[in-house]
């Protein structure tokens, strides 16, 4: 991957075909994780829309209980952290009113990245319009947070320990991907 560079109203880079495939796979895994969690949360049967606001509120309260589930997956916990860790009730309320929209925003940003990756297949340069840069940054951040969680990176010291792993350790490859995503993210920001 080359550094992102600004050319007019686009941010341009080039990826090796393997890099396009890797990034595409990572984004698809993120989408699957977010979508699977979302389907569990929204498993209530769909009902016909109504103009009656009280019926809407009643249905909303049934579909989204006062105590929404905290995700079991540590990656989802990192992507949707407790807003008020010392106040379970406030944290639950915050999750109830924001998580669905936050998940939808993450999925929409990931879709922008997938569409961009499709445009750079066959060795073509990736050209990210400036108005898509935010979606790219958010998705790269979500991917890095996901990998950091899986690799148990909590601070600079734990990252340094992973950087020193021998090449035959499977975590060494994942750490390399984590660093590669950091490079993409850093050069994208610098090109803005």
Image: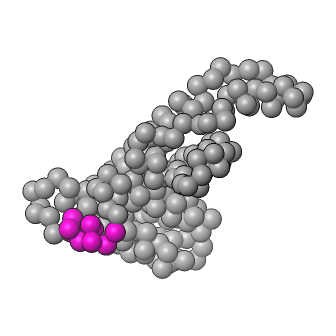
Residue 136 visible here: no
Image quarter in which the N terminus is found: bottom left
Residue 151 visible here: yes
Image location of residue 2, percent across then percent down: 35, 72
Image quarter in which the C terminus is found: bottom right
Q: Is residue 51 left or right of residue 134?
A: right
Q: Residue at x 46, y 77 (%)?
A: 5
Image location of residue 70, percent across then percent down: 51, 41
Residue 71 in the image: above or below residue 144 = above
Tell me the magenta residue range.
155-163
Determine the residue located farthest toward the bottom in the rendered image: 190
Residue 79 in the image: above or below residue 128 = above
Q: Residue at x 43, y 39 (%)?
A: 72
Q: Residue at x 51, y 71 (%)?
A: 11
Name the residue nearer the viewer: 106 or 132.
106
Determine the residue located farthest toward the right in the rendered image: 52
Q: Main secondary structure of the magenta part?
A: helix
Image location of residue 109, percent across then percent down: 55, 53
Q: Quadrant of residue 158?
A: bottom left
Residue 158 on the magenta span: yes
Determine the residue located farthest toward the front in the rendered image: 86
Image location of residue 29, percent across then percent down: 39, 43
Q: Is residue 38 left or right of residue 13?
A: right
Q: Is residue 85 left or right of residue 126?
A: right
Residue 157 in the image: above or below residue 26 = below
Q: Is residue 7 left or right of residue 169?
A: right
Q: Residue at x 65, y 49 (%)?
A: 90
């Amino acid at each position: 991957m080359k550094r992102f560079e600004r050319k007019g109203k686009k941010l341009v880079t080039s990826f090796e075909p393997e890099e396009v495939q890797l990034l595409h796979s990572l984004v698809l895994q993120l989408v699957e994780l977010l979508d699977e969690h979302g389907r569990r949360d929204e498993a209530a049967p769909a009902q016909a829309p109504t103009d009656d606001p009280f019926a809407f509120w009643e249905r909303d309260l049934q579909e989204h209980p006062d105590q929404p589930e905290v995700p079991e997956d540590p990656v989802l916990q990192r992507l949707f952290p407790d807003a008020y860790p010392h106040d379970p009730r406030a944290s639950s309320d915050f999750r109830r009113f924001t998580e669905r929209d936050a998940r939808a925003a993450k999925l929409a940003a990931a879709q922008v990245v997938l569409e961009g990756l499709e445009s750079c297949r066959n060795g073509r340069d990736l050209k990210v319009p400036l108005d898509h840069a935010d979606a790219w940054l958010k998705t790269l951040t979500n991917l890095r947070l996901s990998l950091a969680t899986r690799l148990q990176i909590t601070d600079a010291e734990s990252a340094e320990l992973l950087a020193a792993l021998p090449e035959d350790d499977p975590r060494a490859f994942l750490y390399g991907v984590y660093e590669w995503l950091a490079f993409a993210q850093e050069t994208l920001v610098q090109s803005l």
